[in-house]
Image: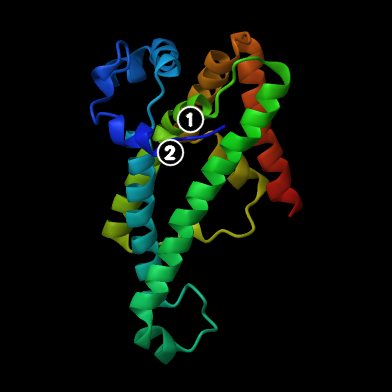
Amino acid sequence: MHLRVSDFLEEKLNISSVKNVSVYNFLVKPFEFFKALNKEPKFFIPLLLMIVINFVFSIFVSYISYGNGSLNSNMNNQFIQDNKILLISITTGVSVIGQLITTIGMCVFLYFVFSLFFNNIKFRNIFSLMLYAKIPEFIYTITLTIFLAITKDISSLNNIDPTMLDSISKIFNPFNVWHLILFGISIHTLTNMSKKKSFFIVSLFPILNLILEQLI
C-alpha cells in the first residue's frame, strides 16, 4: 500500500489520455470509465479539485461565519476582528486537511477490508476510483459556494441537530445519489463482485450514517 511521488509527477492533466477515461464516459458510461481507470489509476485531477474546491468553500464559510458572529459566538468580537485572517486561515487549513485525512482513511479502511477477501487489491487503485467517485460531491460543493457568494447565508450549514427528515433528504440529494452510484460502480470494478452486492454494500453507508446522526 503506497503512492509514489512519481505517480503524481508523471500523470498528465488530460484524463482522456487513457482509452475510455473521458468526461463523456464518466457522465454517460461510468462502468467503462471506472474499468479503464482501474487499469491505469489516475488521481491528480480529482485530488487537486478536492483540495482547491474545499479550500475556496472553507474560506467563504469561515469569512461569513466570523463576519456575522455565527461561528464561535462566545468569542470576544474584538479578538475576532483583530485576528480574522489568522482564524480564517486556521479554519480553512483544518477543513482541507480534515477532508484529506477522511478520504485517505476511508481508502485505507476499504483497502484492508477488500484485501481480506479479494486478491490483487492495490491501494492506488482504490484511492483513484474513490476520488473520481467523489466528483459529484465536488460539484455540489461548488453550487454551495456560489449560493454562499450570492446570499451570504450559512444557516443551512449550521444544523447540528438534524431531524430524521433532514437526514433522509440529505441522503436523497441528487449529488449524493450520484456519488453513491459511482461508489457502487467503484466497488464492483475493484472487487469483481456482482453489481447487486456492490450496491447493497454501498447502501449500508447512508443507512449507518442516518442512524448515527439520530443517535448522537
Residue that appears at 53% across and 14% down: 189
Query: Residue 183: horizontal and vertical position, in percent?
Result: 53, 25
* Image position of 201 with respect to 69: above or below: above
Residue shown at 40%/10% (left/top)?
Answer: 32
Based on the displayed image, in which of its 4 quarters is residue 15 positioned?
A: top left
Give SS at disc 1. Answer: helix
- Residue 136 lies left or right of residue 162; in this view the side is left
Label of residue 179 in the image: 1
Which residue lies at the image location 39% right of the left edge and 59% below the top edge? 58
Q: In the image, which disc is placed on residue 26?
A: none
- The image quadrant that residue 151 belongs to is bottom left
* Percent of width and height locating residue 97: 47, 55
Name the amino acid type tagged 1: His
Packing grade of label 2 (10 A; few <14, some 14-19, many >=20) is: some
Amino acid marked by disc 2: Glu
Where residue 135 appears, as percent x and y from the top left, is 39, 34
Q: Position of residue 123 (x, y in %)?
A: 54, 29
Q: Residues within 10 Å of mark 1 (few under 14, many from 20)?
A: many
Res 137 label: 2
Asked if one can make out residue 153 in the rendered structure from this viewpoint, the answer is no
Instruction: Look at the image and tell me in which quarter the C terminus lies.
Output: bottom right
Q: Which is more N-terminal, label 1 or label 2?
A: 2
Q: For the residues labelled 2 and 1, say whether their Cβ atoms are less than 8 Å apart.
A: yes
Q: How many marks?
A: 2
